[in-house]
Image (spheres, rainbow, N blue to C red):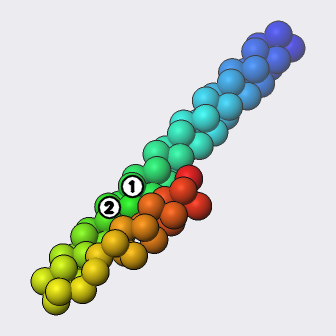
Amino acid sequence: MQDFLQKQVDEKKKKAEQEFMDEHRQASMCQALADQEKKSYYSYAEKCIKDWNEAGKNIKPLLIELKTYNSKVQ
């Protein structure tokens, strides 16, 4: 009987550890995806600003919008 109870405790402990590791792995993957999306967004924004500047357009509205976007997202 004692062996059976110990086996149940060990299985429950292993299951909890596995769930913790899975949650940690998933959180890491979500963070990596968010970082990649943010990097892509800033790359695109930099390209737009550069294109507007080369076309002789005023880039201040773009910069203001970028700042307000950042404050809304965070």
- Could you tell me how many numbered marks the image carries? 2
Residue at label 2?
39
- Say which element carries label 2: helix
Of 27 and 67, nearer the camera is 67
Residue at label 1?
35
Q: Going 68% across and 24% down the picture, which residue do you hit?
A: 13
Type of amino acid at the residue the image marks with label 2: Lys
Q: Going 67% across and 34% down the picture, which residue do you hit?
A: 15
* Vertical arrangement, residue 30 with respect to residue 62, above or below: above
Give the image location of residue 37, x and y in percent. Answer: 39, 65
Give the image location of residue 68, x and y in percent. Answer: 51, 64
**Residue 50, numbered label:** none
* Vertical arrangement, residue 8 with respect to residue 66, above or below: above
Callout 1: 10 Å neighbours few (<14), some, many (20+)? Answer: few
Question: Could you tell me how far apart the alpha carbons at marks 2 and 1 are, in whole angstroms?
Answer: 6 Å
**Location of the N terminus (image quadrant):** top right
Of 69 and 28, nearer the camera is 69
Quadrant in the rendering for residue 14: top right
Quadrant in the rendering for residue 35: bottom left
User: In the image as oriented, which residue stretches furthest toward the right?
Assistant: 1
- Say which element carries label 1: helix
Q: Is residue 50 left or right of residue 21?
A: left
